[in-house]
Image (cartoon, rainbow, N blue to C red):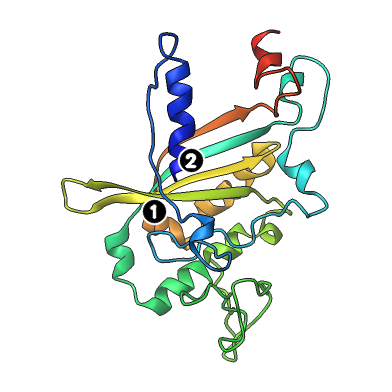
Amino acid sequence: MRRLFHAPRILQKQAAGAATPRWQMNGFNRTPGATARPMTVRNLMGEIDGTNNPKPTDKDFNAKIFVPDKNGPQAWMNGGSYAVVRRIRMLLDPWDDLTTTEQEQVIGRRKSNGSPLSAPASTGTETTPVDLEKFTPDGSLAIPADAHIRVAAAQSNAGATILRRTFSYHDGYLPDGSPDAGLLFVCWRADPTTGFIQIQLKLDGSDHLTRFIRHESSAIFAVPGGAQPGEYVGQRLLEA
């Protein structure tokens, strides 16, 4: 957290007289070293958030996340990525009115350890593969048809995935007394139209979780690739 504060502070100091911040959103998260072993964080709904994120070791990771090299006007984005940033307010009061079982049906995972509902309760873990074809003894889907993890799954979106990172925020209380709190959602993709937008369209129409969240702001940012020796970030764009 300290390093995340320090970096923009230095940039602001160095830009003094030429630029000033227009807006800022503040979020918080657990520092990776705060636990004895790596653990996926929980959001303000109490849910483990960030499971099944693409990994750099995946064979198609670079192709999905980073813009491929090309010539022409868009060459300044070679090696970069597009970041989608959203402020998502959680409707925590109605969410808390649900039982734990109802919450698990909305997400498709057990609240205790993040294991998918398709896995045995006694042996499932957060990393147990999700089985979207699994049925319960009474013939119903183990993971409900409108559960968040089913609707967002790559299998439900022609293989589309996103690299995502989330931060919680709490900005006090609204006039009606409900908490102004939720998630600062950030994801990266080489082409947002074949990643985030494709998944979001499916979520908007089918995801049970949408009843308990409100998307209050959204933007897509072009993030240039890293600077080569002797360059600065964005040089190929700014000096074109």
Number of other residues with Cα within 10 Å of mark 2, as a class: few under 14, some 14 to 19, many 20 or more: few
Seen at 53% across and 65% down, the residue is 146
**The label number, if any, that marks residue 183 in the structure image:** none
Q: How far is disc 1 from disc 2 in space, using C-alphas?
A: 30 Å
Q: Which mark is residue 3?
A: 2
Q: Secondary structure at mark 2?
A: helix
Report the residue at 39% width, 22% height from top: 21
Whether 118 is drawn above or below 16: the answer is below
**Residue 100 location, quadrant:** bottom left
Nearest to N terminus: mark 1 or mark 2: 2
Circle 1 Cα neighbour tier, 10 Å, few/some/many (<14 / 14–19 / ≥20): some
Question: Hey, what amino acid is under mark 1?
Answer: Ile
Q: Check the image and report above or below for 116 versus 76.
A: below
Q: Which residue is mark 1?
A: 213
Q: Nearer the viewer, residue 119 or 172?
A: 172
Q: Nearer the viewer, residue 226 or 219?
A: 226
Compare residues 148 and 75 and report the one nearer the observer. Answer: 75
Quarter of the image for the C terminus: give it: top right
